[in-house]
Image (cartoon, helix red, strand yellow):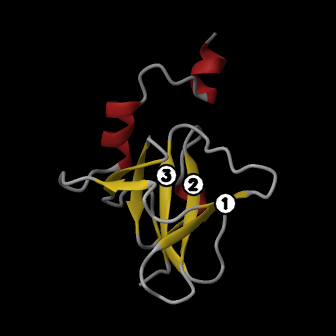
Amino acid sequence: MSAYVDARTEHFEEITIFDEPALFTSLRIDPSTIPVGVYKYEIRHDDECRGIACEVARRILVNHWGSILTLRPLDLGDEGRIYMDGDEINYGIDSPVTLGEFMKRHSQGIETPAKQEER
């Protein structure tokens, strides 16, 4: 089994993080499978291993808790990360969804690089 999943075929849990719709998997996502206009971040859990999400960054090396995809970039600030206490994530109760389904549902009004080229 690969250590990375294919964003095009994986089924994700739909969540919100910082009030932004996102897709979550506890696995790492192969960056080469992520379409243009989709942003990947990784989440780190606490050092005590209590399962508390405590940091979002482009890449997490230690205490990887999961990966998320968003259709809008998150502002990671000057440090390139956001520290959090876990309350910033709201989990959905819907069935798992694919990236394609998520994009159809949430891409209205979002200016993606592909849409910019159409102008």
Q: Earlier in the sequence, mark 2 or mark 3?
A: 2
Percent across and percent down for residue 16 are: 39, 48
Q: Which mark is residue 58?
A: 1
Q: Residue at 54% across / 78% down in the picture?
A: 64
Identify residue for label 2: 40
Q: Earlier in the sequence, mark 3 or mark 1?
A: 1
Measured as percent of width and height from the top left, residue 18 is found at: 49, 46
Q: Amino acid at mark 1?
A: Arg
- Going by the numbered disc 2, the residue's amino acid type is Lys
Q: Residues within 10 Å of mark 3 (few under 14, many from 20)?
A: many
Q: Quadrant of the C terminus?
A: top right
Query: Of helix, strand and loop, which one carries label 1?
Result: loop
The x and y percentages for residue 38 are 54, 43
Which residue is denoted by mark 3 in the rendering? 69
The residue under the point 56% across, 62% down is 84
Q: Secondary structure at mark 2?
A: strand
Write the residue at 49% across / 51% down: 69
108 displayed left or right of 111: left
What is the quadrant of residue 83 in the picture? Answer: bottom right
In space, the residues marked 2 and 3 are separated at their CA atoms by 5 Å
Q: Are marks 1 and 2 in contact (CB under 8 Å)?
A: yes
Residue type for callout 3: Leu
Dot 3 falls on a residue whose secondary structure is strand
Gap in angstroms between the C-alphas marked 3 and 1: 11 Å
Neighbourhood count class around disc 2 (C-alpha, 10 Å): few under 14, some 14–19, many 20 upward: many
**Outermost residue, top side:** 119
Q: Nearer the viewer, residue 69 or 56?
A: 56
**Left or right: 68 with respect to 102?**
right
Please say if the residues under marks 2 and 3 sit with CB atoms less than 8 Å apart: yes
Pick out the residue farthest to the bottom.
Answer: 48
